[in-house]
Image (cartoon, helix red, strand yellow):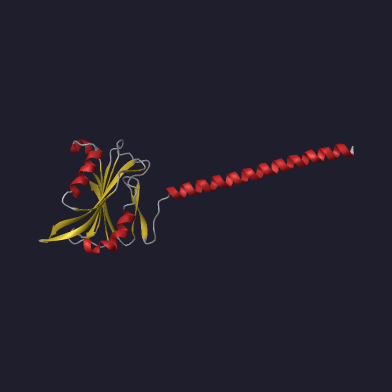
Amino acid sequence: MKTEMQATAQRVLQAVRVTTRFTARFAALSAVLMLASASSQAQGAFTVPDGYVLEALTPTGGKIARPKDWIVKDGRTGSGWAWTMLPEESENGHYETGLQLHAIVGIEMTSKMTRAAYVKNVLAEKKAGAKLVRECPQSVQGRLQRQCLEVIETIERKGESKAYHMLYWGFWSDDIDIVGLFMFGAPQEQWEAFKGSAEVLSGLEFIGPNFDPK
């Protein structure tokens, strides 16, 4: 009897050890999966740096981090929507530093060009006659393709020529009827003061996951 009880106890102890090892491994695996999930969510999160606020691009479901003290004006256009973001109020509609953002629909019908060709044509026109700073290779952002161009342009204002540092981004999709144009500029001599804002603003998500122009 004693021997049988000892054997039974030994089997129970062995089972407990196996269960404990399984539970520990399962807990460790769960912890790893939870960390991986949290990391994935963090990587997909939209970052708003200190000194900036989240600005919703409501018509497209997109979002952008803008300097918290900047002025925002938005509205409907004949071909979509437009936003202007400025560090100060414009003078009679004229300003030297700021962002213009345009969302355009129906571009294939009006321009007789594909959306990709339209964006590349705009960037090519901006590049012509300007001093090239950099060109970004075409990349994917969600459901959109995007590409950038950074140049120094000479612009006539108030009867004199002035150099402006310009950062352009073009967005398009082969499947969704939308084109986006991001145009940020500042006087060349002030570019270093606004370069950081330009880079943060250019991290925008132009459309949301459920955007449908129809």
Q: Position of residue 175 (x, y in %)?
A: 31, 35
Name the residue at 18% across, 38% down.
111
Q: Nearer the viewer, residue 203 or 76?
A: 203
x then y, percent, for residue 15:
74, 39
Drawn side of residue 111 relative to residue 54, left or right: left
Q: Based on the displayed image, in which of its 4 quarters is residue 195 positioned?
A: bottom left
- Residue 159: percent from the left, percent from the top? 9, 61
Quadrant of res 106: top left
The foreground one among 3 and 168 is: 3
User: What count of labels does the image hold?
Assistant: 0
Q: Quadrant of residue 198?
A: bottom left
Instruction: Decide if residue 152 is on the left or right side of residue 48.
Output: left
The structure residue drawn at horizontal position 86% and vertical position 36%, both measured from the top left corner, is 4
In this rendering, is residue 69 above or below 125?
below
Quick one: quadrant of the C terminus? top left
Q: Position of residue 21 (x, y in %)?
A: 68, 43
Q: Left or right of 144: which side holds 38?
A: right
- Does 4 sit left or right of 181 as displayed? right
Residue farthest along the right direction in this orientation: 1
Q: Quadrant of the N terminus?
A: top right
